[in-house]
Amino acid sequence: MNANHIEALIGMLAVAGLFAVMVLPALIGIAHERRVDREIREAQDRFREKEDQKSSSRSTVPSTATWYAEGRRSKKLVSS
């Protein structure tokens, strides 16, 4: 190996090192974003499961607004 080969090897190693230094933060950021997205998705799934459990355990008694609306409808039918 002569001096030209050694210079070329050092140049290639320098370029590869600079490339790694520039790409590594981007790869770390992508991995971090994917982890955060996964955690958000899991939290949303847990929230939906809780909401489903709440809605299935609620009683089927109509609200006050429903009672009021039904009363008004029945009065209209009687008066017509």
Image (cartoon, grey):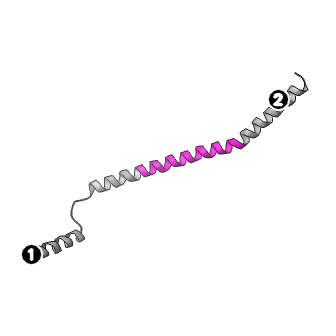
Q: Position of residue 26 (x, y in %)?
A: 65, 45
Tell whether position 78 is magenta: no
What is the CA distance from the residue labelled 2 to the residue labelled 1? 98 Å
Quadrant housing residue 14:
top right
Relative placement, left or right, of 15 versus 69 is right
Badge 1 marks a residue whose secondary structure is helix
How would you classify the magenta stretch by its main secondary structure? helix
Q: Position of residue 75 (x, y in %)?
A: 13, 76
Number of labels in the image equals: 2
Q: Quadrant of the N terminus?
A: top right
Residue 60 vertical placement versus 29 (above, below): below
Residue plotted at (52% across, 48% down): 37
Q: Badge 1: how crowded within 10 Å, few (<14), some, or many (20+)?
A: few
Q: Residue furthest right?
A: 3
Q: Position of residue 35 (x, y in %)?
A: 54, 45
Residue plotted at (79% across, 33% down): 13
List the residue tagged with mark 2: 9
Residue plotted at (57% across, 48% down): 33
Magenta residues, as a range? 22-45
Q: Badge 2: how crowded within 10 Å, few (<14), some, or many (20+)?
A: few
List the residue tagged with mark 1: 78
Q: Residue furthest front?
A: 80
Q: Quadrant of the C terminus?
A: bottom left
Q: Amino acid at mark 1?
A: Val
